[in-house]
């Protein structure tokens, strides 16, 4: 059982405020209606009184604790159901039962907050009744929801109090969402009082906090963001805020929030005006610079750290490595921690503590420190405890520093080269496996941005088939808005092209050379980004060439530091690999085109340019699978042998080409006509009505007969005979049988005077002659 004092403390914590709670009158009314009782309550059991926190069906505000049914619920921390209070041994003499309001039925469940029963959610009736187990469970769940409601009210009240404290303090709170860039979500009300920047204009995106920072401070903010992206939880920096009337120096302490995968989702920052302290520091620095001595030349920087007094004595070489004035060095560990790269801080502290604890014999590690000029210096430290107190606790640590920047830069470059090679192999493997260039580029794009230390990237291919334009194969998924959704959809459909090159990346296309811009606003070709696209601060454009000709480009943007020529040189193997992939794609397209052409030639009669017998057989398979009624027929040129004998084979070829042209013009566009050999042609027609098919075939005969052809300086006319058969859906007879029957119908057309259409009928079985004799006689 919970201690009563602790329970009352929790009750006071959540309900001791004098301000009005958000009432649940509607819920109480619904409870009474659903459970069909006149009274429903949320009660709180105090030290001596029961208070009706929420109520329906009564004007009372509470009762003495000793007569409260809910007191039993709280005491036992368990549900209570009283079906008839007048006969219940615990309540039959209760004044609420014997007198007004004459309670008979009661059902209550505990209202628990932080594990303590503070009161109950209950139902009351003046009639005896029962409550099923199912409805008791429902009442218990409602009590849980009411508990959550009060806890949320408490948290809201606490949050509002915290915000009120911040709004009245000299500390500004700013909250950014991060998705490949910062998006302001919240700025405390005191931002205008402390920093002189309008809260409303910030929140409405009329301008951004970064817009008021100096160039160096924008870089410092980007650097802070970079470290949060890499997993740093908190960071401290100084920023210079440039206002129209004055300049402020700000101290900013930022913290990052991360999702389950460890990716940065938001950044919160506490900002204070640090102008006075900065002025004092600058004045002291200028004074010390005027009094400085000659720098001490030495290969090693030495240090001697008194741990108790927190005083670190260093030589001049130690200061020279970091561009510090020897006289301005204050000797405290605070300066060291300020100069230490945030991403290396945890490692340095761990090695130092392990040495001080005796786990490591020496204190040695490599890390980065900020040079006064702004760049980073790699330092190799070697140190050891040289003095301990009587209890053996370290009190003095001494050692050396060495500048190893050149060595570390070389090692870093080597690691990146290996990473780049692995990345290139991966891109090639994906393409060879899937034969999809855009998909391969998109899958490796995140690794490209990581290798290039950039936030955004795209890979494009030059397309010259329909004018010069650039197809975007892959692009970083950014924080697009409704204004730019069209570009996103076009990209996802593989149809995003750019043909206007009067812009920054267009310079790469027009010049076929590397374009570097570390201040895009100042570049003459820069026209900004499309609406809704995140801002681009720095840009590196790389041409992809094949045999000296431009075939595409890679665009990189928003590196945390400046892009340099060596970045382009480093990525040259990637550009060569992409050029080779583009070439492979062109070769594959050419191969497919050639194969398609060869197939066309294999299925085409060279003289008439109609499909040949092989194509007709393939078409028959498609027709059978279509499960439709169709017509199959054979068309033969009448007296073709006489043309060959009298006018020659060249004239015969002209007649064949003429007949083929007339058939193409006379048959319907979806009919299929093929030359089977000699003067014989075959066709498929979709069968709708037999009369329509008859009319069309008769029209073909008539058109050919009515159209003269000029041969050997004279005009002649030819006619054709057609034999056809209507094939119904479900007919499983082989093609040879259908052609046999169409040929038999053709035989009848020849014997009936030629220049006509004959259809196969079952009656032809008795009169049909063998196929060989029919073929011999009909060719004349």
Image (tube, rainbow, N blue to C red):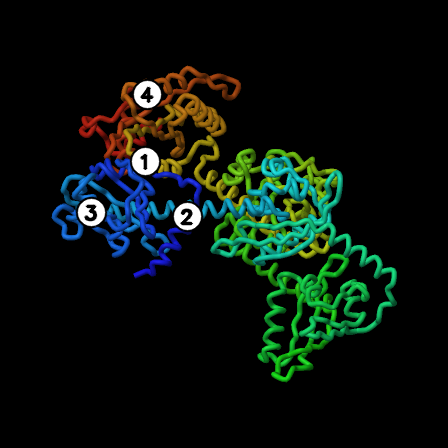
| Outermost bottom residue | 390
From where the camera sits, is residue 732 visible? no
Q: Secondary structure at mark 3?
A: helix
Q: Earlier in the sequence, mark 3 or mark 2?
A: 2
Report the disc number at residue 16: 2
* Residue in front for this viewpoint, 337 or 13: 13
Say which of marks 1 and 4 sits in front.
1
- The residue at which mark 4 appears reads as 754
Q: Is residue 447 above or below residue 671?
A: below
Marks 2 and 4 close (CB-CB < 8 Å): no
Determine whether the residue tagged by mark 2 lies in a helix, strand or loop. loop
At horizontal 16% and vertical 48% (from top left) the residue drawn is 93
Of badges 2 and 4, the one in the foreground is 2
Q: Position of residue 212 (x, y in %)?
A: 69, 42
Q: Quadrant of the N terminus?
A: bottom left
Where is mark 1, residue-wise?
A: 26
Up-down relation of residue 480 to residue 671 (above or below): below
Question: x, y (%) of residue 144?
Answer: 32, 48
Mark 1 vs mark 2, foreground winner is 2
Please name the residue that numbered disc 3 is placed on. Answer: 134
Q: Nearest the camera: 193 or 651?
A: 193
Give the distance between the C-alpha atoms of the residues marked 1 and 4, in whole angstroms.
95 Å
Mark whose residue sits in front, 3 or 2? 2
- How far apart in space, not on screen, are marks 3 and 4 (Cα)? 92 Å
Q: Earlier in the sequence, mark 1 or mark 2?
A: 2
């Amino acid at each position: 059982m919970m201690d009563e004092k602790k329970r009352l403390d929790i009750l006071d914590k959540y309900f001791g405020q004098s301000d009005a709670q958000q009432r649940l009158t509607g819920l109480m009314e619904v409870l009474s209606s659903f459970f069909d009782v006149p009274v429903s309550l949320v009660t709180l059991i105090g030290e001596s009184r029961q208070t009706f926190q929420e109520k329906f069906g009564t004007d009372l505000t509470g009762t003495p604790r000793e007569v409260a049914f809910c007191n039993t619920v709280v005491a036992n921390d368990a549900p209570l159901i009283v079906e008839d209070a007048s006969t219940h041994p615990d309540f039959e003499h209760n004044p609420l039962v014997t007198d007004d309001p004459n309670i008979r039925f009661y059902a209550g469940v505990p209202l628990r907050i932080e594990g303590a029963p503070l009161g109950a959610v209950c139902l009351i009736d003046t009639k005896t009744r029962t409550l099923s187990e199912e409805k008791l469970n429902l009442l218990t769940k409602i009590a849980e929801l009411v508990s959550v409601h009060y806890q949320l009210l408490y948290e809201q009240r606490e949050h509002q109090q915290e915000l009120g404290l911040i709004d009245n303090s000299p500390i500004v709170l700013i909250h950014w969402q991060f998705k490949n860039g910062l998006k302001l979500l919240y700025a405390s009300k005191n931002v205008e009082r402390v920093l002189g920047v309008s809260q409303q204009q910030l929140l409405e995106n009329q301008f951004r906090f970064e817009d008021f920072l100096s160039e160096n401070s924008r870089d410092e903010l980007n650097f802070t963001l970079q470290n949060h992206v890499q997993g740093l939880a908190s960071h401290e920096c100084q920023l210079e805020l440039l206002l129209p009337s004055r300049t402020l120096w700000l101290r900013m302490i930022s913290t990052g929030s991360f999702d389950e995968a460890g990716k940065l989702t938001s950044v919160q920052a506490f900002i204070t005006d640090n102008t006075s302290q900065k002025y004092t520091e600058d004045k002291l620095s200028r004074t010390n610079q005027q009094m400085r001595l000659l720098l001490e030349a030495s290969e090693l920087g030495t240090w001697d750290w008194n741990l108790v007094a927190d005083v670190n004595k260093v030589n001049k070489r130690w200061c020279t490595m970091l561009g510090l004035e020897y006289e301005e060095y204050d000797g405290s560990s605070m300066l060291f921690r300020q100069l230490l790269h945030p991403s290396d801080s945890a490692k340095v502290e761990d090695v130092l503590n392990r040495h001080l604890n005796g786990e490591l014999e020496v204190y040695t590690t490599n890390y980065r420190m900020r040079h006064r000029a702004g760049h980073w210096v790699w330092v190799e430290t070697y140190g050891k405890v040289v003095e301990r107190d009587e209890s053996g606790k370290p009190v003095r640590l001494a050692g050396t520093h060495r500048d190893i920047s050149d060595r570390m830069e070389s090692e870093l470059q080597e690691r990146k080269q290996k990473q780049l090679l692995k990345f290139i192999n991966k891109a090639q493997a994906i393409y060879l496996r899937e034969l999809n260039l855009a998909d391969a580029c998109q899958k490796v794009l995140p690794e490209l941005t990581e290798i290039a230390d950039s936030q955004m990237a795209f890979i494009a291919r030059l397309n010259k088939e329909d004018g010069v334009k650039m197809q975007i194969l892959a692009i970083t998924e950014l924080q697009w808005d409704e204004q730019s959704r069209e570009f996103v959809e076009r990209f996802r459909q593989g149809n995003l092209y750019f043909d206007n090159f009067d812009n920054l990346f267009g310079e790469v296309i027009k010049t076929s050379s590397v374009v570097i811009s570390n201040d895009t606003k100042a570049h003459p070709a820069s026209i900004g980004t499309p609406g809704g696209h995140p801002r681009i601060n720095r840009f590196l454009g790389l041409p992809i060439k094949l045999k000296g000709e431009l075939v595409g480009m890679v665009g990189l943007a928003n590196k945390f530091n400046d892009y340099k020529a060596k970045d382009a040189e480093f990525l040259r193997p990637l550009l060569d690999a992409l050029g080779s992939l583009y070439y492979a794609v062109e070769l594959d397209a050419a191969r497919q085109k050639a194969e398609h052409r060869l197939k066309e030639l294999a299925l085409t009669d060279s003289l008439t340019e109609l499909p040949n017998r092989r194509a007709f057989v393939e078409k028959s398979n498609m027709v059978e699978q279509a499960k439709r009624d169709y017509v199959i027929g054979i068309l033969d040129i009448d007296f073709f042998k006489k043309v060959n004998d009298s006018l020659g084979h060249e004239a015969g070829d002209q007649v064949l080409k003429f007949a083929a042209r007339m058939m193409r013009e006379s048959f319907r566009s979806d009919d299929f006509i093929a030359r089977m050999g000699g003067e014989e042609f075959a066709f498929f027609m979709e069968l709708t009505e037999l009369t329509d098919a008859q009319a069309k075939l008769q029209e073909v005969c008539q058109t050919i007969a009515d159209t003269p052809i000029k041969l050997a300086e004279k005009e002649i006319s030819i006619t054709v005979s057609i034999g056809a058969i209507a094939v119904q859906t479900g007919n499983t007879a082989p093609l040879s049988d259908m052609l046999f029957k169409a040929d038999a119908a053709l035989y009848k057309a020849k014997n009936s005077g030629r220049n006509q259409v004959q259809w196969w009928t079952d009656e032809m079985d008795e009169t049909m002659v063998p196929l060989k004799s029919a073929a011999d006689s009909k060719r004349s």
